[in-house]
Amino acid sequence: MARLLALASSVLLLIAGMGLPQARANGMHPGCAGEALCQQRFVRIGGIDQWISIAGESPANPVLLLVHGGPGIPQWPAAERFKPWEKSFTVVLWDQRGAGHTFGRYGAKTPDVTLQRIAADGVELSRYLCRTLGKKKIVLLGHSWGTLVGVRMVQQAPQLFAAYVGTGQMADFHADALIQYRLILAKARRDHDTAELQALRALGRPDPANARQYAAYRKYLPTVMAPSDLAYLKAQRAGAAALAAAHPKEGPDVAAGAKFSHPLLWPYVVRADLPKTAAALGTAFFLIQGQRDVLAATPQAVHYYRVVTAPYKQLVIIPNAGHFALLTAPGKFLHALTGKVRPVAIARGA
């Protein structure tokens, strides 16, 4: 039954990691040629080799570490989408323990796949980036599952980060599930879908700890997702086979790593309650959230933003965007990064 839950709850996020199948099979991401900084390599982090990509147009720019979602879904296949960011940031992609290239090196023998260890890896990586790229602090951007990792990283070592940016920000997973349920129920009422209403009422309030019940109601979630998310996922699903064909090793490692990581890390998602466990952050906090995100429900993400105490806070809501706003509303998202995050991060030591 845990397998059913994994399929029901992660398939949408899994497809999102499949990206554009344009990265070269040797692991070099697309377009990584001619930049002032252009590196892809394994580094020793947390006792194992972990894969990173560093790309940017000027070493003077702030360093931005992207902490991917999933759990277990790397962003290297979508590296081309972040190329516009490289004018203003040195962009670092990281295949976390149990994900992507890093999973490909160790497979099912990957040790210690826990939230605590991955966050500690992230802190160690951040120190490495500061040291090798000559920075006092970096910018941290977490998406979806990566927001749980990113917040934990900031809690562990706030002095390393000039700013934390959350998008698809997770907060209280049980509260997210209740918001989803109410949206689905309201949609069924508007549509006069008697059969769906009866099924939802029979299920009752969602309980993410109950795998059977939770999987049963999550199948209705696409009915209330943002059209931009649905269109994006459809396009990515169509490109998944091409990714595997173009990259016979690295492509399959994306899905295999997610399948391996998900059952190990999903319990941390279910237990998440950041308003209680992370109500204070020791750096600037930006929330750049799609207005129509229902996977990490925007009302709950905004509630978390309001609860948090931080030296500086700013909220940016992207109209009509959903969980994948950083990819489906690229212009608006980059405008927020360059116009709002970058100047504050520079002022705070980036």
Image: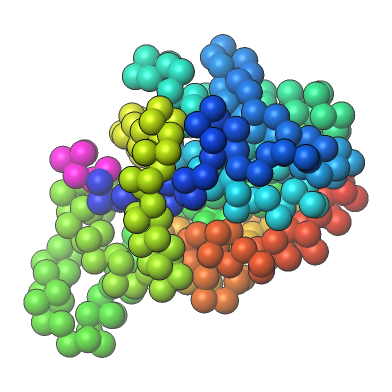
Magenta span includes 254? no
Quadrant for residue 308, please give it: bottom right
Name the image colouring.
Answer: rainbow
Relative to 192, does residue 288 appear above or below in the rendering? above
Q: Quadrant of the C terminus?
A: top right
Q: Give x and y (percent) for residue 169.
A: 53, 55
Horizontal relation, residue 271 to residue 96: left or right: left
For this orientation, the residue located farthest to the top is: 47
Viewer-closest of 18 and 319:
18
Question: How many numbered marks appear?
Answer: 0
Magenta-drawn segment: 1-6
Q: Residue at point 39% right, 52% down?
A: 239
Q: Give x and y (percent) for residue 220.
A: 24, 66
Q: Residue at point 53% right, 64% down?
A: 328
Horizontal relation, residue 219 to residue 279: left or right: left
Question: What secondary structure prevails in the magenta region?
Answer: helix
Residue 274 in sight in this render: no
Viewer-closest of 21 and 141:
21
Horizontal relation, residue 43 to residue 145: left or right: right
Q: Quadrant of the N terminus?
A: top left
